[in-house]
Amino acid sequence: MKIYPTLNLQHGRVVSTAGLEGVCPMTPHDVAERLIDEGATRLALVDVDAAMGRGNNRELIGQILHRCRTRDRKVCVQVAGGVRSSDQAQYFIDLGANWLVVGTILHKSPMVSEQLMARFQSFLTAAIDARGGKVHRSGWVDTTTLSALELAMRAKAYGFRRLLFVDIPEVATADPDFETAQDLALATGLPLVMGGSLTTARHLEAIHAHQGLKGALVDALLFQQNPSLLAFLQATCA
């Protein structure tokens, strides 16, 4: 199973999307380095500011990508948040990103989606951020009437070969929406990684029981709070 410890970057710091309180005292660089030292071969970097249209953490992401390239073993990195143009996509690819996640442009800018697909298809993952089956966008601050399944099928029609379903829970203690995740995977026939609501070892173990689910994004700060999650990091990046 592919596990992506996820650094959510806001104002140059790592923040939690899992309901954890307080500010992380470690720098993003140190968080990434510690996870790699513990066995992580994948990381996900999310530019929360860029996703919300309130600045960006591009330079910081570039620094983390550079550090990952200089490690003594391969570390694959996925970048998300505000990837809405070919120039932005090329910037991260040149710095060593293995995958780029796009979401908002799937329903706001079909033409940009097609342009990105024409140039970067092998790098792209379509993000479907949804709560209760309905799509949210622009860093979850904008809701739509579009269903998660409709957006997944649109992404497949564009030519995306990989999906990320970000399950936005109603409350932090809600169970993950594995049903929607499996429906998206089976309906599209595309490999799907799930994130957003996966916070415990029990959640990660449950992935195996659902067809089409290939892995999980997990808030990086949860690995500090619950060291038992570190056991899930031992998998070669491929």
Image (cartoon, helix red, strand yellow):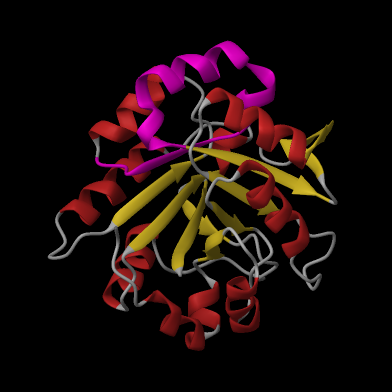
The quadrant where residue 170 appears = bottom right
Q: Is residue 136 visible?
A: yes
The residue sitting at 55% across, 45% down in the picture is 190
Residue pictured at 44% horizontal, 65% vertical: 2
Secondary structure that dominates the magenta span? helix
Q: In the depicted view, which residue is nearer to us: 139 or 13?
A: 139
Give the position of the C terminus as an image quadrant. bottom left
In this orientation, does residue 177 appear?
A: no
Position above or below: 203 against 94:
below
Q: Position of residue 100 (x, y in %)?
A: 43, 38
Q: Note whether 154 is above or below 203 in the view shown.
A: above
Give the vertical position of 107 relative to 93 (above or below): above
Front one among 1 and 28: 1
Based on the picture, tell me whether residue 121 belongs to the magenta stretch: yes
Could you say which is closer to the camera, residue 10 or residue 220? 220
Which residue sits furthest bottom?
228
Point 54% across, 20% down: residue: 113
Horizontal relation, residue 203 to residue 98: left or right: right
Locate residue 104, reporting x and y percent.
64, 29
Left or right position of 65 against 224: left
Q: Which residues are magenta?
A: 96-124
Residue 109 in percent (x, y) is at 62, 16
Q: Position of residue 151 (x, y in %)?
A: 71, 33
**111 in magenta:** yes
Number of disc labels: 0
Quarter containing the N terminus:
bottom left
Tell me if 140 is positioned left or right of 23 in this view. Answer: right
Q: Residue furthest top?
A: 111
